[in-house]
Image: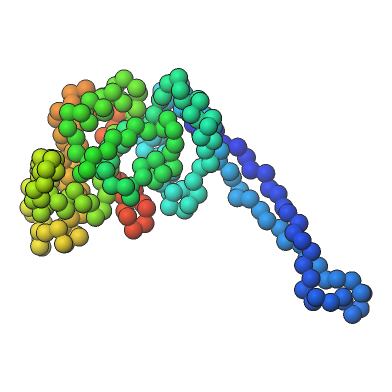
Amino acid sequence: MKKTLPSVAFCISLVTLNFSCQNSPTTGQVKTDTVYLKQPEQVRIVDKTLTAEEQRALTPDMVIKNLKEGNARFIKNDLTTREHSALILDAKMGQYPEAVILSCLDSRVTVEDIFDKGIGDLFVARVAGNFANEDILGSMEYGCKVSGAKLILVLGHEYCGAIKAAIDNVKMGNITQMLKNIKPAILKSQDFKGEKNSKDSVYVEYVMKNNIIHTIEVIKAKSPILKEMSDKGEIKILGAYYDLNTGEVKFLD
């Protein structure tokens, strides 16, 4: 799918090193050594966006595999090199992304980065608490039914401020109305054994995961288009969350 160029092993002979700062007593010559630097075994360079043919050839499972592999590279700080000027020009006539990602607003969750993706690879919708309303659903329908994306991924994250605010029943301007979309996840979490407050990180994580599950239920219940595509195997609708401690994206069963 991505253009991969083989790396060229190379070495650089560095400046001659004088370890004794004096001539050798036996030869009268300066002691020298050569240091070799090597590139990584593979250098991934991407200068083309996905084509319609490449997108059609993808399956939902292939996209999931691609995202997991990209996240593994992100964790290892082994990101793909992208020629952004070339990608901008290549993408101007059309787009054929792999997936739709519904993420929280949180600035610590940089969606393209954590999956090692770039221009033209993903549709990304963001809203605090990663819930699905009519606008988000319409965007997802466009991304999948019209533009051919093969996966919808609802992406939550640890230590989510929107989840904490919903637990604390925060009242503030339009935030009050927004948090109502997260309240069903709190109801789903009534079986939690322990203190149910925003200071308990285990409880917050439990609500966060239930919020992902609830959002998936909303997508299937309120979008017949997406549910039909899912039932036919044309797309998959999954949940995952981002671990702020490690950078790992953990997929929910």
- Pinpoint residue 176: horizontal percent, then vertical percent: 10, 43
Question: Which quadrant of the figure contains the C terminus?
Answer: top left
Q: Residue furthest right?
A: 27
Is residue 241 at all visible to an observer of this figure?
no
- Pinpoint residue 204: horizontal percent, then vertical percent: 18, 55
Q: Which of 173 and 96 is in front in this view?
A: 173
Q: Which of 140 and 236 is in front in this view?
A: 140
- Pinpoint residue 13: horizontal percent, then vertical percent: 76, 56
Q: Is residue 115 left or right of residue 179?
A: right
* Residue depicted at x 53% and y 32%: 85
Q: Quadrant of residue 24?
A: bottom right
* Residue depicted at x 36% and y 38%: 64
Q: Is residue 238 above or below residue 78?
A: above
Q: Is residue 10 left or right of residue 181?
A: right
- Pinpoint residue 14: horizontal percent, then vertical percent: 74, 59
Is residue 51 at all visible to an observer of this figure?
yes
Q: In which quarter of the image is residue 130?
A: top left
* Residue depicted at x 20% and y 60%: 201
Q: In this view, does 144 lie above or below 83?
A: above
Q: Is residue 22 left or right of residue 168?
A: right
Q: In this view, does 206 lie above or below 124?
A: below
Task: State how the image is colored.
Answer: rainbow
Q: Which of 226 and 36 is in front in this view?
A: 36
Q: Which residue lies furthest to the bottom in this view?
A: 25
Q: Is residue 200 left or right of residue 142?
A: left
Q: Which of 211 and 92 is in front in this view?
A: 92
* Residue depicted at x 17% and y 50%: 163
